[in-house]
Image (cartoon, rainbow, N blue to C red):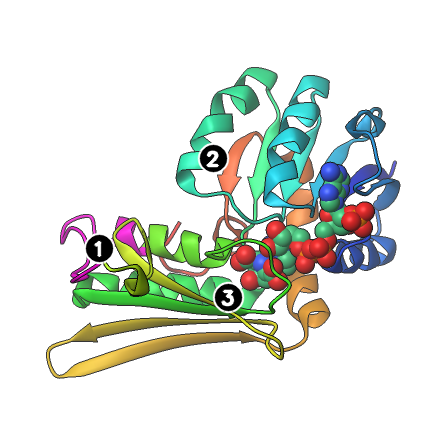
Amino acid sequence: MSTRVALVGATGKLGTIIRAVIDELDGFEVAEVLTSQSDLSSIDGCDLVVDASTPAVSMMVIRAAAERGINVLVGTSGWSAERIAQVRSTVDAAGIGVVFIPNFSLGSVIGSALAALAAPFFDSIEIVEAHQHTKIDSPSGTAVRTAELVAAARDAQGPVNAPHVDQRARGQQIASVPIHSLRRPGVIAKQDVILSGAGESLTITHDTVQPAAAYAPGIRLALPFARDARGVVVGLENIIDLGLSAS
Ligand SMILES: NC(=O)C1=CN([C@@H]2O[C@H](COP(=O)(O)OP(=O)(O)OC[C@H]3O[C@@H](n4cnc5c(N)ncnc54)[C@H](OP(=O)(O)O)[C@@H]3O)[C@@H](O)[C@H]2O)C=CC1
Ligand SMILES: O=C(O)C1=N[C@H](C(=O)O)C[C@H](O)C1
């Protein structure tokens, strides 16, 4: 029997890509499409909710799914560890699974994992992310997740060395890592993690060139995983084996 998906944000850029992937995927069908004009109660009777909406809407989507005992795959950004902590008890009490994927691109996830691998060896670490000017949130969900992974990997070393962060131009600190967000036409999604140490620096760059091609493999892996998940799971690195301890 086919898994009936309610796709929230189906008319958006990410929603359109997810819909195309589901249309080609055996065992899944888009049963409900939700947009800004929809009532969230139309997820009733679906087996999985996929959220590709906005950070403001995403929390309501999870709560609506939890009330109905439906698992959720969240592609929407804005889910820092602190915000995820706010829904953890709701998810556990409902006995459902909610899988947050800050970035469906395999290259992006590998880039973040490499940054975490290198993090203990460099005391200065900063992230520069660029997205198209239409993106409504900053910093990007990917940058937030990368900063959190970097900080976790530096548990023994402590916070990064980020001087003068009281000055606004020094970026927004997430888990001690300064993040600088550019919003401009002509870019899709790009992230540089710049690690600096004595006499050297290492830059880990990920560039999304064709979103549909970049996100489709991760979406294909995440759908069955999210359908069967229990509890909260964050990141594609929990679905693919990177051979690194970055999760
Ligand atoms: N995890 C990943 O790999 C990726 C994540 N993203 C994230 O996905 C999210 C969406 O990005 P993107 O597709 O570019 O954004 P878009 O602005 O293109 O799409 C937003 C979608 O959300 C819908 N929406 C808005 N308000 C509501 C509401 N109240 N209820 C239901 N649906 C609503 C819109 O519907 P309407 O058409 O009616 O306005 C539209 O379908 C962002 O948070 C972005 O950062 C993006 C790309 C990749
Ligand atoms: O809005 C986007 O476009 C993207 N959003 C996600 C994020 O905030 O990290 C993922 C990707 O960077 C594209």
The three-letter code of the residue at mark 1 reads Asp
Residue 115: % across, % down: 34, 65
Q: Give the magenta part as a residue range.
A: 150-166
Quadrant of the rendered structure where residue 133 is? bottom right
Q: Earlier in the sequence, mark 3 or mark 1?
A: 3
Left or right: where 22 falls relative to 117:
right
Q: Secondary structure at mark 2?
A: helix
Q: Is residue 168 above or below residue 174?
A: below
Q: Secondary structure at mark 1?
A: loop
Q: Secondary structure at mark 3?
A: helix
Q: Earlier in the sequence, mark 3 or mark 2?
A: 2
Q: Residue at x 36, y 61 (%)?
A: 179
Q: Which residue is mark 1?
A: 166
Q: Residues within 10 Å of mark 3 (few under 14, many from 20)?
A: many
Q: Residues within 10 Å of mark 1 (few under 14, many from 20)?
A: few
The three-letter code of the residue at mark 3 reads Ser
Q: Which residue is mark 3?
A: 108
The three-letter code of the residue at mark 2 reads Ile
Ligand 2 found in image quarter: bottom right
Choose between 19 and 184: the one closer to the eye. 184
Q: Is mark 3 within 8 Å of ligand 2?
A: yes
Left or right: where 243 falls relative to 44:
left
Q: Nearer the viewer, mark 2 or mark 1?
A: 1
Q: Residue at x 63, y 25 (%)?
A: 63
Residue 185: % across, % down: 62, 76
